[in-house]
């Protein structure tokens, strides 16, 4: 097991300390799916910045493009100016991502992070429809600013906002109830019935696989039915692909296999490719109703992020990347299922799609203990879910089979240690 030195942190009085409870060491280098700390310990990354590092750490091609751009004195900060880096990104995003999928969206840069794209989507939906309410789902996570927090289905996180905003309604996500209750029918009845107290909403927002909420997977047919409800009641459909987008579940957009076409799509995390902050709001052309200057911000669309993001699109020139993610995801899924059978003490359940996999364990505190044991053996993992009951398995998508197997074997040893 690994020895770490936390003496520096122990002297520090900063918020940095709170993060070190999960990963108590000081990291210094990273490459691909590996990280190293100041003591020279090596770690395997099964966390990938919660989906921000789908292409791994320090991808050599992206790094080279960034170095070239900087060496050339490429413009870095440009605010309201058009730049060649931005133009090139938009061109390539259209060519490689939108056009082959037959998707027609205008691209907006709402601010640097995931919560900014969600805020812009909420604002735009309310502006377009003139309605106030937004429907989100149980266990949803959409960000930490006031608007996105008000549609987050986690009361602990919402309490951090004091009194959360009104105008948001949380409905049951797919499979939220263990019994036969059908959440789409419930939603439809609420919308139809004046007595439900539910105002006609501006939008419905959802993640196709809830990341922070515990790797809850919406079935494709459920998504299709939600889309039908949106069309029937003239409600905008917003898909938050901040964590599951950019190939986490296989396809570039998580919703592609469901055959739905959201009105607005939120992208961030891995779109910045090199861990650089970038967020995109994709808007159906007829809904691009912003007046100039109505939604602004100093760090919208950073040029270094554009350089990185453009280079990362090369992963999407063929189907190979998505197929490989699906293959590796299936491998993880099967391995976790076999663990659940082998260790009935876990009272475990495996959920996930692509390389967004979760091992839900019903024993209180056990998921945390597994992650702590894993860290000591050089594997970085986090928990999610309302009671931190789910061990998330989210390696960078570029991980090879050797890394995957090594990580999974550490996970098994950590489980053995935690249930002892
Ligand atoms: N939406 C989803 C689905 C997320 O997982 C997150 C971040 N975990 C966000 C929005 C917010 O992104 P950020 O932390 O970059 O603001």
Image (tube, helix red, strand yellow):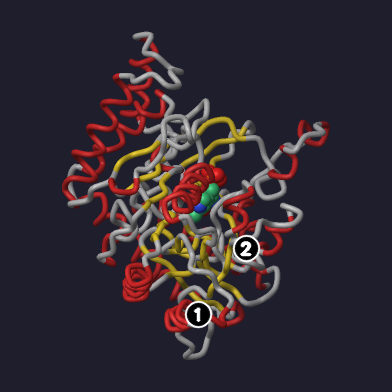
Q: How far across and how far down the image is residue 104, in percent?
A: 23, 48
State whether residue 197 appears in this view: yes
Give percent across and percent down for residue 351: 45, 71
**Quadrant of residue 326 within the rendered picture:** bottom left
Q: Looking at the image, can residue 43 be seen?
A: no
Q: Is residue 318 above or below residue 68?
A: below
- Residue 306: x and y in percent read 36, 28
Q: Nearer the viewer, residue 21 or 412?
A: 21
State which quarter of the image contains the C terminus: bottom right
Q: In the rendered view, tell whether residue 330 sits above or below residue 376.
A: below
Q: Residue at x 66, y 72 (%)?
A: 419
Question: How many numbered marks have been drawn onto this rendered protein structure?
Answer: 2
Check mark 2 vs ligand 1: CB closer than 8 Å? yes or no.
no
- Give the answer, above or below, for where 378 lies relative to 353: above
Q: Quadrant of residue 311?
A: top left
What secondary structure is found at the residue carrying circle 2? helix
| Element assignment for label 1 | helix
Using residue 174 as the reference point, say whether residue 367 is left or right of it. right
Location of residue 183 in the rendering, given as x and y in whole percent from the top left corner: 47, 80
Depth order, front residue of 389/415: 389
Name the residue that disc number 1 marks.
190
Relative horizontal placement of residue 192, taking residue 25 as reference (left or right): left
The residue wearing badge 2 is 370
């Amino acid at each position: 097991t690994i020895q770490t030195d936390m003496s520096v942190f122990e002297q520090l009085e900063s918020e940095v300390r709170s993060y070190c409870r999960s990963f108590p060491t000081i990291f210094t280098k990273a490459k691909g799916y590996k990280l190293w700390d100041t003591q020279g310990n090596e770690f395997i990354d099964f966390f990938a910045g919660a989906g921000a590092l789908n292409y791994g750490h320090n991808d050599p091609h992206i790094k080279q493009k960034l170095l070239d751009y900087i060496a050339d004195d490429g413009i870095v900060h440009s605010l309201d100016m058009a730049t060649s880096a931005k133009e090139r990104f938009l061109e390539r995003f259209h060519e490689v991502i939108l056009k082959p999928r037959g998707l027609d969206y205008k691209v907006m840069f709402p601010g640097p992070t995931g919560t900014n794209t969600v805020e812009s989507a909420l604002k735009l939906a309310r502006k377009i429809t003139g309605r106030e309410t937004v429907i989100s789902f149980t266990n949803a996570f959409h960000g930490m600013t006031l608007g996105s927090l008000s549609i987050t289905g986690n009361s602990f996180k919402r309490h951090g906002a004091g009194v959360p905003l009104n105008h948001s309604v949380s409905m049951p996500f797919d499979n939220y109830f263990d019994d036969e209750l059908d959440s789409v029918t419930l939603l439809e009845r609420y919308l139809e019935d004046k007595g439900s107290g539910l105002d006609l909403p501006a939008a419905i927002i959802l993640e196709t696989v809830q990341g922070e909420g515990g790797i809850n997977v919406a079935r494709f047919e459920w998504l299709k039915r939600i889309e039908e409800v949106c069309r029937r009641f003239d409600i905008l459909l917003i898909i938050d692909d901040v964590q599951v987008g950019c190939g986490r579940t296989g396809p570039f957009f998580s919703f592609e296999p469901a055959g739905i076409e959201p009105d607005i799509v939120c992208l961030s995390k891995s779109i910045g490719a090199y861990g650089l902050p970038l967020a995109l709001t994709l808007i159906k052309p007829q809904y691009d109703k912003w007046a100039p200057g109505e939604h602004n911000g100093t760090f919208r669309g950073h040029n270094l992020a554009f350089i990185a993001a453009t280079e990362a699109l090369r992963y999407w020139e063929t189907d190979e990347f998505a197929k490989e993610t699906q293959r590796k995801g299936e491998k993880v899924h099967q391995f976790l299922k076999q663990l659940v059978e082998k260790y009935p003490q876990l009272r475990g359940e495996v959920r996930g799609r692509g390389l967004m996999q979760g091992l839900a364990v019903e024993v209180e505190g056990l998921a945390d203990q597994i992650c702590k044991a894993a860290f000591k053996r050089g594997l970085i993992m986090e928990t999610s879910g309302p009671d931190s009951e789910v061990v998330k398995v989210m390696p960078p998508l570029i991980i090879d089979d050797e890394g995957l197997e090594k990580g999974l074997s550490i996970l098994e040893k950590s489980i053995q240690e935690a249930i002892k």
